[in-house]
Image (cartoon, rainbow, N blue to C red):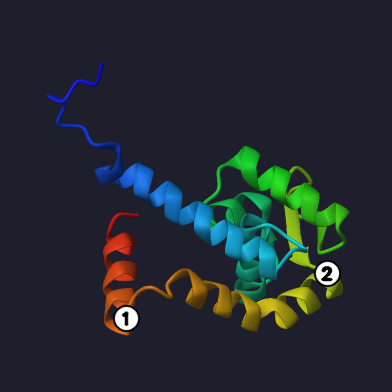
Amino acid sequence: MVDTTLDYVLDDQIGYVLRRVTQRHLSIFSEHIPEVTTTQFAVLARLAETGPMSQNQLGRAAAMDAATIKGVVDRLAKLGLVMTAADPDDRRRLTVALSPAGSALFRTRTETALAVSDATLAPLSTAERKTLLALLTRLT
């Protein structure tokens, strides 16, 4: 029996809608950039933008907690896309930098990544895209 008195409609919930949009974006991304995940690409992008930094700083800069950034950096290092080294001033601190292969992958895939964003937002007009991004940014 369905309870029709509930005010909660799943399709109207922000978390549900965001998850569905994220699933759509991840599908588009993996189809066009199979070498890395969206999270890994975000780390490559942040390193390309800022240069080498500590793993802790990188996690904050890429909006990832300590456990997540460690796993992402470990996987990128195994792929040869980043290099890690102990900080000479604090051997407990790990510095992360793009490797030549990581830099090359980011450069060659940047245009594709922009096209992925465009495809994700394809149902929206230019004005709607700007509004959506502005509104979502306010929620962060």
The location of residue 86, given as percent across then percent down, is 81, 52
Residue 36 in the figure: left or right of residue 80 = left
Neighbour tally class for label 1: few under 14, some 14-19, many 20 plus, Cα within 10 Å? few
Residue that carries the numbered disc 1 in the rendered image: 125
The location of residue 113, given as percent across then percent down, is 61, 75
Q: What element does badge 1 sit on?
A: loop
Residue 117 in the figure: left or right of residue 48 = left
From the viewer's side, name the closer residue of 28 and 45. 28
Q: Vertically, is 24 above or below 127?
A: above
The location of residue 93, given as percent across then percent down, is 72, 47
Quarter of the picture containing the C terminus is bottom left
Residue type at tag 1 = Ser
Residue that carries the numbered disc 2 in the rendered image: 99
Q: Residue at x 19, y 20 (%)?
A: 3
Q: Which label belongs to residue 72?
A: none
Looking at the image, is mark 2 or mark 1 earlier in the sequence? Answer: 2
The location of residue 79, given as percent across then percent down, is 86, 58
Q: Residue at x 79, y 48 (%)?
A: 74
Q: Residue at x 44, y 56 (%)?
A: 21
Give residue 67's quadrant in the image: top right
From the viewer's side, name the closer residue of 30 and 57. 30
Residue type at tag 2 = Ser
Q: CA distance from mark 2 to mark 1?
A: 38 Å
